[in-house]
């Protein structure tokens, strides 16, 4: 069994070349979203403890990135999850829940009360994950995703 662990990750603009490539491949494989090295580095994510990457501690350093959670301040008390993805091999084993709980705690301690994010309408698995954690669909997003309809979901950080 690999020893997978969420550790603090760099802000996008400070990713290594390999790190950026690994995250671009993760997005493409697991969400179908296409990013270039430039577009990923320009994502408006600050450096803070709520940025997490999933690595296998048994691999030699620098370990390949197998999951990402990136969050960014949105409004005074709302934090936005801008990216949340785990490599398919490691999905549905509770690792997403661990990242979410860590993010929730750090964001709460930083003064945020609510969390907001965007999700594709056909991504019912992710919507289920978020609904179980207190988020609800607040708005339909037309034209946000090239592939079709999206939803904006929001909920309390401490449901
Ligand atoms: C969405 C995502 C980040 C969630 O992470 P995850 O690791 O798969 O989520 P978890 O394993 O913590 O929880 C998912 C389910 O697995 C179940 N689970 C938890 N521990 C488990 C275990 N040890 N064994 C099997 N299943 C388990 C959970 O109960 C949960 O089911 P539930 O929804 O009925 O509660 C991940 O599935 C993913 O990367 N999906 C593709 C990309 C994506 O859609 N991202 C969101 C874009 S908005």
Image (spheres, helix red, strand yellow):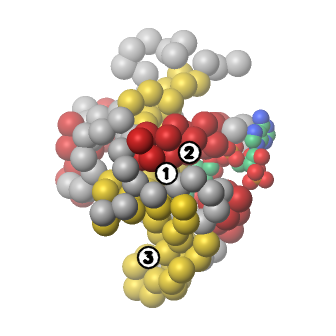
Mark 2 to mark 3 CA distance (whole Å): 23 Å
Look at discs 2 and 3 and give the one toward the viewer: 2
Which residue occupies the foreground of this view, 103 or 19?
103
Q: Is mark 2 within 8 Å of ligand 1?
A: yes
Tell which circle, 1 or 2, labels the residue nearer the N-terminal end.
1
Q: Which mark is residue 98?
A: none
Mark 1 to mark 3 CA distance (whole Å): 16 Å
Instruction: Give the left or right position of residue 23, taking residue 17 as reference.
Output: right
SS at circle 2: helix
Choose top left, top right, bottom left or bottom right for residue 2: top right
Q: Is mark 1 within 8 Å of ligand 1?
A: yes
Q: Is mark 3 within 8 Å of ligand 1?
A: no
Look at mark 3 in the image and give the residue it sits on.
145
The residue shown at (54%, 61%) is 156
Look at discs 1 and 3 and give the one toward the viewer: 1
Look at mark 2 in the image and give the residue it sits on.
100
The residue shown at (54%, 12%) is 58
Mark 1 to mark 2 CA distance (whole Å): 9 Å
Do labels 1 and 2 touch, CB within 8 Å?
A: yes
Look at mark 1 in the image and give the residue it sits on.
84
Residue 54 visible? The answer is yes
Tell which circle, 2 or 3, labels the residue nearer the N-terminal end.
2
């Amino acid at each position: 069994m690999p020893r997978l662990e969420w550790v603090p990750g760099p802000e996008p603009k400070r990713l290594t070349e390999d790190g950026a490539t690994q995250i671009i491949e993760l997005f493409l494989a697991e969400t179908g979203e296409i990013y270039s090295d430039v577009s990923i580095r320009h994502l408006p994510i600050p450096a803070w403890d709520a940025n997490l990457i999933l690595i296998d501690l048994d691999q030699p350093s620098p370990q390949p990135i197998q999951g990402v959670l990136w969050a960014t301040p949105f409004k005074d008390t709302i934090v936005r999850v801008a990216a949340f993805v785990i490599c398919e091999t490691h999905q549905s084993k509770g690792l997403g829940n661990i990242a979410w709980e860590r993010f929730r705690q750090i964001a709460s301690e930083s003064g945020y009360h609510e969390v907001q994010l965007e999700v594709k309408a056909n991504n019912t698995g992710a919507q289920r994950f978020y609904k179980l954690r207190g988020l609800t669909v607040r708005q339909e997003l037309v034209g946000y995703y090239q592939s079709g309809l999206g939803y904006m979901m929001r909920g309390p950080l401490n449901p």
